[in-house]
Image (tube, rainbow, N blue to C red):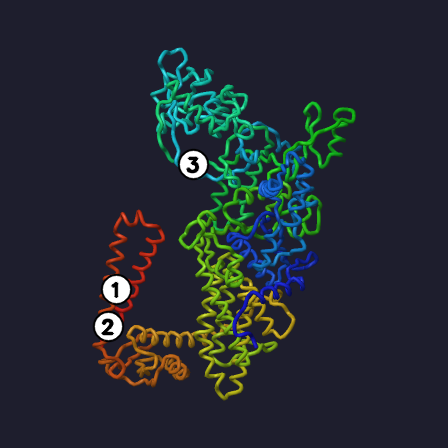
Amino acid sequence: MLDKIYSPQSIEVEQYGRWEKAGAFACDIDSDAQPYVIMMPPANVTGTLHIGHALTYTLQDILCRYKRMQGRDVLWQPGTDHAGIATQMVVERQLAKEDLDRKTMGRDAFLERTWTWKETSGGEIMRQLRRLGASADWPRERFTMDEGLSRAVRKAFVDLYKEKLIYRDKRLVNWDPKLQTAISDLEVEQRDEKGHLWYIRYPIVGEKNKFITIATTRPETLLGDTAIAVNPTDERYKNLVGKKALLPLVGREIPIVADEYSDPEKGSGAVKITPAHDFNDFEVGKRHQLEQINIFDEMAALNENAPQKYQHLDRFQARTQILKDLEEQEFLVKTEKIAHAVPYGERTGTIIEPRLTDQWFMDTRGLADTAVKAVKDGKTKFVPQNFTQIYFQWLENIQPWCISRQLWWGHRIPIWYGPDGTTFSAMDEDQALAEAKKHYGKETPLTQDEDVLDTWFSSGLYAFSTLGWPDETKELGRYYPTSVLITGHDILFFWVARMMMMGLHFMKEVPFHTVYIHSLVLDEHGKKMSKSKGNTMDPLHLCDKYGADALRFTLTALAVKGRDIKLSEKRVEGYRNFTTKIWNVARYLQMNECTRVENFAPHRCRLTVNQWIVHEIGQLTAHVSDALEDYKFNDAAHHIYQFTWHSFCDWYIEFTKPILTGSNKEEIEETRATLAWSFSQLLHLAHPIMPFITEELWEKFSGGDILLITSPWPSFGQESEFKDAKAEIDWIIQFISEIRTLRAETNIPFKTKLTLHVQEPTSRVRTYITLNEDLIKHLGSVETIDFETIETKGALQLVVPEASILIPMADVLDIEQERSRLNREIEKLDGEIVRFSKKLDDQNFVARAPLEVVEEQKTKRSTALETKDRLASALTKLGQL
């Protein structure tokens, strides 16, 4: 017998061990089955499971379990990412505690220390994913810096370099002064802050007491100005275009140019142009062939290109001094307070500095065009479809990709320099030396580039590098392209688009046929979760408290296409109750000796109620299958929940209780078998979402060693539909539901027995009622049912399909007292509705109150209106008496 209380913790550990021991997660390279492949987004080795991960991996696991049960050869490829910046920061923090520094210990020693950390502490998230129930093919786990993937990275770089798609250039990059490296746009966080706009006047060269005033939020970059831009349509400055201005504090002459970048409506309409320290200015500088003057070093302090007075000052110290000097020399006109976006390094919290440096870039224009065409041709589709346009927009406006990072941890760029600066790109140093010997005509020492590659470079190869590329392996031939990629929209550009470009370039085929973009997980008030706000939810804590199945089902039930998820612990608790419900159903079946019958044939059921549940199972199978095929995860969860709680528990179990306590052995035997069969089918259908409890109960009911995870997905044909049985039982359910609703609306207690007079029934309905009279009486608390025609006076009328029902009220209800009660309730609700409406009509309240408070008032008003309508309906019925 099952334990009285469902305790998920011990069960989850035990069942996961059974799956791994049986090799249930493994793909089969030699299988004849059709492959189904999902690449698990490689988690950072520094990462731990957060609620967004829980959603991503739950949805992937659902599809893998579903397809596995369908008989597909499933490969869910797990992996971890070396996470260059994040990992280096972790190790450097450890070193700082020991008063060590990577630069003093040297590159080799630092990398050795980092590898040690990775082997002992990295990959914690992979262990945590097992806790969530992830059924990945763990023996195939890859690491983006393992031997095979490192070789793939070098091969990709060398090929792209030789195709002249990788090149070195001096361009602006996002520079993190704390990390002292370029970082990607993804790692830049724009924060809205209060700041200042400083108006500074620049003297016009050759014109006494004439100035042009610019407005800037960054006066410290003034020292690197090489022009002033005005809009060509701005009448105020037309006579100044072509002239020169004198740069305050420096004395350098700079041109005044006409460029549409300058907005006449902003600031003074004139802008300073600092090509080496602003991305927009960089483009203006290129259009006008302006000089690029870099005034900051790698730590964002003023360098030798600034006047000596400011050299070595931190940029913000320099700002203070420059503003002071501008004011003293009467160049500072005024200061305005403003709100503006400031770029911060996501990992370090340091303000990012646009900086002109020599970096390695990848020309992605042609690759992007190919990636756009593949989607337009239907080779890859996005779900939801609206992400297609976002994908197009980004790729059609793509810029050269800065792929170099000034770090030590990562894939070192496979470029070697000769003594004269000649570059050699090769798979290893020996190959580079051989090329150098051929070039120079003698053996020549080389120096390898110090930089490493952007983490996204290796991630972009992930769909095929993990399968053995550049070798032509069996895995590559069988499992590429993959089936579907599931990820969040935050890495649509940085990973999805780059995988598309790399896959099409190297494999000549898209890396996946479908990209499902899931929503964000927000807190219960619809706000983004963050540690600083204190509103994060730890998925491991939720698993420990409520069980992994409850968390998985909650996330699935809320995963509506294109809609962000508002998650609260109460929701998880609610679905924990659902797992308890399933557990209790299983106990009920055990107590009533409902055991699985081998080779049970559902289409041979003779009792109408059993035929009905067989039909419902068929419908449920179709609904869940269709929902999963269409990535409507919430619909799949909804159908399972509704069937379990209502069709199975509220109705079928109640319908079958009189049979199980009856004396007809044949009916008892069929009903026990049908109960067991239908419950086992439910376990199959719920397994992808709730793997642990379903596997545990399947083990108890299967009577064998066959795992549910590898059991076939439910399927049976048209002979099991039993449409007539469905029509009959559905009518009976509706009939009983109407009686129960009437009781609730008119305050008639269940213990009070009713008399029903069925008026003008069709022959079909008369048959339904006659065959199911005992059920109606039992579940509706009815004393008698007859088909006599009576006067409507003094009776409530229920209208149901193909009949009307009259229920005499004289002996059941004090009509005047009930009418008075309903009027009081309606009057009370009217007051509440007025109060809620008054608040919601108050624009000050709506504008100032927190969003969640406004939504709460709207919900309360809506509930009050619905309740009033229901009571008014009951009052109308009483008026008929």
**Real-space CA distance between mark 3 and mark 1, rounded to the nearest whole angstrom:** 47 Å
Residue 252 place in picture, x, y as percent: 47, 16
Foreground of the two, 729 or 546: 546
Q: Is residue 349 left or right of residue 826?
A: right
- Residue that mark 3 sits on: 341
Foreground of the two, 578 or 619: 578
Question: Image point 71% across, 47% down: which residue?
Answer: 472
Residue type, mark 2 in image: Arg
Q: Is residue 640 visible?
A: yes
Q: Dot 1, crowdedness within 10 Å: few (<14), some or many (≥20)?
A: some
Check the image and name the residue furthest to the bottom: 663
For mark 3, give the secondary structure: strand
Q: Is residue 802 left or right of residue 32?
A: left
User: Residue 812: which quarter of the image?
Assistant: bottom left
- Residue that mark 1 sits on: 829
For mark 1, give the secondary structure: helix
Residue 732 place in picture, x, y as percent: 39, 77
Question: Can you say whether 288 is above or below 690 in the image?
Answer: above
Residue 398 place in picture, x, y as percent: 52, 36
Question: Image point 30% across, 81% down: which residue?
Answer: 759
Q: Is residue 456 visible?
A: no
- Residue that mark 2 sits on: 821
Q: Quadrant of the N terminus?
A: bottom right
